[in-house]
Image (cartoon, coloured by chain):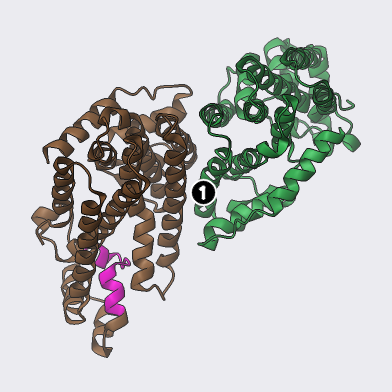
Chain colours: A brown, B green
Amino acid sequence: MEKINGYTTLVEHTLTRQDFNDKPIELYEPISYILSLGGKRLRPALTLAGCELFGGDPNDALIPALGIEVFHNFTLIHDDIMDKAPIRRGKKTVHEKWNGDVAILSGDAMLVKAYQYIVKVKPEALPQVIKVFNQTALEVCEGQQYDMNFETQDDVSEDDYIEMIRLKTSVLLGCALKIGALVAEASVKQSELIYRFGESIGIAFQIQDDILDAFGDPDKFGKAVGGDILNNKNTILQLYAQHHANGEQQVALKAIYESDNKKVEAIKKVFIETGALDYAKKRMDGYYDEAIQFLKEANGLPEIENELATFAQWLIKRDL
Amino acid sequence: MEKINGYTTLVEHTLTRQDFNDKPIELYEPISYILSLGGKRLRPALTLAGCELFGGDPNDALIPALGIEVFHNFTLIHDDIMDKAPIRRGKKTVHEKWNGDVAILSGDAMLVKAYQYIVKVKPEALPQVIKVFNQTALEVCEGQQYDMNFETQDDVSEDDYIEMIRLKTSVLLGCALKIGALVAEASVKQSELIYRFGESIGIAFQIQDDILDAFGDPDKFGKAVGGDILNNKNTILQLYAQHHANGEQQVALKAIYESDNKKVEAIKKVFIETGALDYAKKRMDGYYDEAIQFLKEANGLPEIENELATFAQWLIKRDL
């Protein structure tokens, strides 16, 4: 993934040279802060990849790519308020470090900043770029709302759940790629196909994240295994298991355990027995295959197509 | 103000026909709700006026005008959270009727919705429209932040205060007018002049609001007189009086009174004695005169110019 790595480096370098130190500092300091916490910068890298895939100069997509990253970080600030999350990437969240009002208002300013970056494209591309970005931004809000609704809703289907993760996280990957494609003046069909690639690979990734949370290798996964189980979170595994458990398995799903470890092990057993693990893997593979199909149909430059295929593989086929 | 009244009616009519009833309803219902609470729709009416002033068809500016109104209402939702305001236009605020999370997320969605409306202009006008809107949206956030900062800051100058009200409220009037002008393909100079008209008249209006709060006729002002004094709010009068009061007047400004009425009367006396009232009137007149000058220089169609001059007069020269 030499190219993608190059893109992320270029994005990081450009981002650190941006000056967010306007006045009043109370408004702009949190913006610099959240952006300084790091992150892989994969979304903006996809914008550059989407541009080069269709013969464009990735430098032409660099500023809109920053807009994608700034938008993503805006959602983190506001989501962290709603999730009451104290920590983000090992540091205090904005509402914890400052307060809720600062987090609301800095987030708002960041959303506007994202637009300022996004619109820095050729006038010919502008209407389409802004259209897909507007739609995506609205869908991300819808996804967050569904996610919050589902916390207290007991009739969530697997498809509802997948629709939620599509809106909350996957459409932004599609949007990132499509904006790159639009900057490169790709055809409508190509722009749409690369959007679909991003969307599908995003869903596959989120399903995998659910699987890894329960069945991942703790050394490789990078976070404690079983967190979703212990927090009673909706996951594709949990929902499928609920819908397909027999009486005994239902009891196991709802039981109170002496230790966290016992709970995780018992519920993982139900995930296997009910077929939830197999089901999740099948859905994940389905979205992954679909994504690769969209990528091929988009018929971009082979070098970048290979790069994106490798990226997709890297994203999904992490060791279980 | 037959024209302006016609514009507000047209905006209201178009707004009520908009369908905000998308899913999830938890996200969209608060948007319909805040927009249904009313308001004079003056900002979007200014967009139509700005368009017709320079020979454009106001219908071409109607959808972007809705964007201005939706943006304004987005700021109300988020500001009400920060101000902990329970009531807006006689009804519960969004965060009171639902909760803070709903108010944050619906507000975010509303900001994106505003962009969806704003960009519905001819492609030629789009880059300039989005540029002024982005800048304005950011400035409105800056104004709100300054407003919050000033609550706990004791060295606020009169000019700092005016800069705050310029950012928080006046630039949006300028932006509303300028977007109309851009839709009408007015010259750069004309678009800038009509922006300045809106900005200056907005500042004059806010200063007048400060004056009326203390010295207005309760029957005509529409809200209780002395509210700013009783809430120890920064106003141009309060700041000037603080900076120019002698020892005795300083005591009066900070004294504790047996009744609200005594406090209001005592502080109004200081406002008069220190020259704060005269100063505020002078500043207001200065911005008003400046506004009219910009309007004339903009050299638009006489009929609409007269209409806007009458509007400015109506806005400012309410009986004291």
Q: Is residue B256 shown to the viewer in this render?
A: no
- Return the residue nearer the eye: B182 or A268: B182
The correct choice, above or below, for B306 with respect to A66 in the image is above
Q: Main secondary structure of the magenta part?
A: helix
Report the residue marked by disc 1.
Answer: B109
Mark 1: which secondary structure? Answer: helix
Name the residue located 43 percent from the left edge and 60 percent from the top edge: A148
Residue B75 visible: yes
Q: Quadrant of residue B166?
A: top right
- Locate the C terminus of chain A and report the quarter of the image it occupies: bottom left
Q: Residue A311: x and y, percent? A: 16, 47
Q: Residue at x 65, y 53 (%)?
A: B18
Relative image position of residue B307 (x, y in whole percent): 83, 27
A151 vs A53, left or right, is right
In the picture, measured across the screen, residue A86 lies left or right of residue A104, that is: left
The number of callouts visible is 1
Between B308 and A213, which is closer to the camera in this rendering? B308
Name which residue type carries label 1: Ala
The x and y percentages for residue A88 are 30, 44
Residue A265: percent from the left, percent from the top? 15, 73
Q: Which residues are magenta?
A: A226-242
Q: Is residue B225 magenta?
A: no
Could you tell me which chain the residue with mark 1 belongs to? B
Q: Which quadrant is the N terminus of chain A positioned in?
A: top left
A248 relative to A210, above or below: below
Front residue of B22 and B107: B22
Where A34 sits versus A146, above or below?
above
At 83% across and 34% down in the image, what residue appears?
A: B3
Question: Does residue A71 appear left or right of residue B225 in this picture?
Answer: left
